[in-house]
Amino acid sequence: MSGQGPADSPGGGPAPPPPGGDQAEAAGAPGLFETVLSFFDSLGAYVSEAIRLEGLRIDAVARGLLAHALLLIMAAAVGLIGILFICLGAAMWIGRHFGSPGLGLGIVGLACVIAAGAAILISRGGRGARRKERPGEP
């Protein structure tokens, strides 16, 4: 007996596994891992690109809304200055008519407060202290 069997290696250690056994399965696992990793990497790139493009679209929409809001603010400021001059003119005319500038300012100021209160009530749709009941509510 030579002491060397099929399971003994020439170096004295365990013999290498036979070809086509566990080594082939171990070689397939990293390939699967790499495929799954590549898939999730591609998915992440797709999602980040979609978010970037959506962000650009939102930025364009936000810029448009901001431009419209600024235009509305400027128009409201010019309109308020116009209303201010109309009220001052009416106050001066009423004050001259009654002989008291303070009375003219008071009358026009009271008219502006009443108009503002009416505008607030109209904008709320008449929803004051009383709550309208809807059908089907207890």
Image: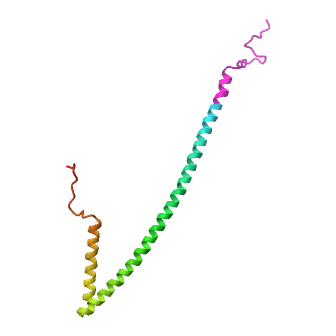
Colouring of the image = rainbow
Q: Nearer the viewer, residue 109 or 72?
A: 72
Q: Nearer the viewer, residue 11 or 80?
A: 80
Q: In which quarter of the image is residue 130?
A: bottom left
Task: Give me the residue at 49% from left, 64% from top.
Answer: 64
* Residue 74 higher or lower than 44, as above or below: below
In magenta, the rendered stretch is 1-29
Q: Is residue 136 left or right of residue 12?
A: left
Nearer-the-camera pick, 10 or 89? 89
Q: Look at the magenta stretch and give its main secondary structure.
A: loop
> Which quarter of the picture shows residue 29?
top right
Residue 2's spot in the image, x, y percent?
80, 8
Q: In this picture, is 42 found above or below 7?
A: below
On-image quarter of the N terminus? top right
Indicate the position of residue 114 as horizontal and vertical percent values.
25, 76
The number of numbered discs placed on residues in the rendered structure image is 0
Q: Where is residue 98 shown, x and y percent of the image? A: 23, 92
Relative to 65, say whether 137 is above or below: above
Query: Residue at left 54%, top 51%?
Result: 51
| Residue 24 falls inside the magenta stretch | yes
Q: Is residue 8 left or right of residue 37?
A: right
Q: Residue at point 61% right, 37% down?
A: 37
Residue sitting farthest toward the top: 1
Residue 21 in the image: state x and y as whole percent: 67, 19
Tell whether position 68 is magenta.
no
At 68% from the left and 24% from the top, the residue drawn is: 24
